[in-house]
Image (cartoon, rainbow, N blue to C red):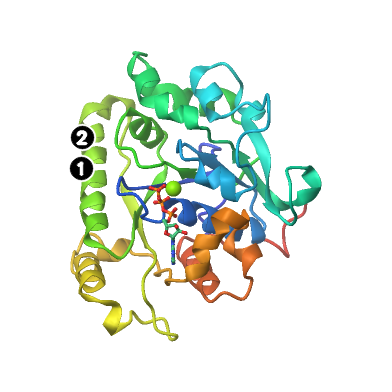
């Protein structure tokens, strides 16, 4: 199979957008872990944190934007250029806020999130061309050749912000946890993208859910879904597997591992918090299924 990870024909990096409105679906963990995995495989990766909760930025070493540091909201407003909002991802190795308390993660950048993104819907809604803001930023400001893959943490939104992200044509990854509310969230996401397609067809809008990432799933050691996962999990998994449109989109499941929760407070992605954690195998399998190949030994930098 030819590599699907290198830049697209239009010269854009490959873009993956983790989305679904239901909170706690694993969007942030999906973005972070796939980003760290891809960076470890030798790809140059950027995480875009669109979520006002900014959990992606937090886990990647930035509890709050450093003083004077531009964020994604400044870019959205046109007050800063994209490059000014880019920082190097890092993980915490000590106490305090000094640079010495962190180690940078090779190949991985973050476009910093901010609580101000809570105003994004209003700001974009007031701008007649608001839905095109990201498209314009990518057309005019994307540093050429800097990133191979960009991962978008969309946050729990189905409004203009999501449409503006969808407008740039990412592969949307519908994220689902082990409850039925995420199945409903996935349906809502598909409907929103369908509506966008009808409304914005003349702009070439045709973004749809291309992958489904199920996380927090009780798996046996052999990778099978545990039968005693509980009725709620069973119903949710059945709804995914029995749906003939969704079943082919399913990525390998990410197993339930309590240590994911610690990654936030420790500001360490799972790879750096617990390098032997079995869920890292699932993340690796998901990256394989996405065609994110290993460049480490071949890439010349
Ligand atoms: N495989 C897993 N096993 C155990 N806990 C997990 C797993 N994946 C994610 N979690 C935990 O579930 C919670 C929700 O995950 P995450 O933050 O990635 O979801 P989200 O969709 O980004 O949520 P939000 O809508 O709040 O942004 C977090 O506490 C996370 O650490
Ligand atoms: Mg999140």
Q: Secondary structure at mark 1?
A: helix
**One can see residue 9 in this view:** no
Tell me which corner region of the image, top left, top right, bottom left or bottom right, holds residue 51.
top left
Q: Residues within 10 Å of mark 2 (few under 14, many from 20)?
A: few
44 left or right, relative to 167: right
Q: Nearer the viewer, residue 203 or 131?
A: 131
Residue 218: percent from left, percent from top: 36, 75
Residue 128 marker: none
Most foreground residue, 205 or 29: 29
Residue placed at 18% from the left, 64% from the top? 243
Query: Is 130 on the left or on the right of 283, as rendered?
Result: left
The residue wearing badge 1 is 191
What is the CA distance from the residue labelled 2 to the residue labelled 1?
Answer: 6 Å
Residue 43 x, y percent position in the rendering: 64, 53
Callout 1: 10 Å neighbours few (<14), some, many (20+)?
Answer: some
Q: Is mark 2 within 8 Å of ligand 1?
A: no
Instruction: State the residue lying farthest toward the right.
Output: 100
Q: Please, is residue 285 above or below residue 101 in the view?
A: below
| Quarter assignment of residue 158 | top left
| Residue displayed at 25% across by 50% down | 185
Query: Going by the picture, which residue comes out furthest to the bottom?
Result: 222
Give the residue pinned by disc 2.
Answer: 195
């Amino acid at each position: 199979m030819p590599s699907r990870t290198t830049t697209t024909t239009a010269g854009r990096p490959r873009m993956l957008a983790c989305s679904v409105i239901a909170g706690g679906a694993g969007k942030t963990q999906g973005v972070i872990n796939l980003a760290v995995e891809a960076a470890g495989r030798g790809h140059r990766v950027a995480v875009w944190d669109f979520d006002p909760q900014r959990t992606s930025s937090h886990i990647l070493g930035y509890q709050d934007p450093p003083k004077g540091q531009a964020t994604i909201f400044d870019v959205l407003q046109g007050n800063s250029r994209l490059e000014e909002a880019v920082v190097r991802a890092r993980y915490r190795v000590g106490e305090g806020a000094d640079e010495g308390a962190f180690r940078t993660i090779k190949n991985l950048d973050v476009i910093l999130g901010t609580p101000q993104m809570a105003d994004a819907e209003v700001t974009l809604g007031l701008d007649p061309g608001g839905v095109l803001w990201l498209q314009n930023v990518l057309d005019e400001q994307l540093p050429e050749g800097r990133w191979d893959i960009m991962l978008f943490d969309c946050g729990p939104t189905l409004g203009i912000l999501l449409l503006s992200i969808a407008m740039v044509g990412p592969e949307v990854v519908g994220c689902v946890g082990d409850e039925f509310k995420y199945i409903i969230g996935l349906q809502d996401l598909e409907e929103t993208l369908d509506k966008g397609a009808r409304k914005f067809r003349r702009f070439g809008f045709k973004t749809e859910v291309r992958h489904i990432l199920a996380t927090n799933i009780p798996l046996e050691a052999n990778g099978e879904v545990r039968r005693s996962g509980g009725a709620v999990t069973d119903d949710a998994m059945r709804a995914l597997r029995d749906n003939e449109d969704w079943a082919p989109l399913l990525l390998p499941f990410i197993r339930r591992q309590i240590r994911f929760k610690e990654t936030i407070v420790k500001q360490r992605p799972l790879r750096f918090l617990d390098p032997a954690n079995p869920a890292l195998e699932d993340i690796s399998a998901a990256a394989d299924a996405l065609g994110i190949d290993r460049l480490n030994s071949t890439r010349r930098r």
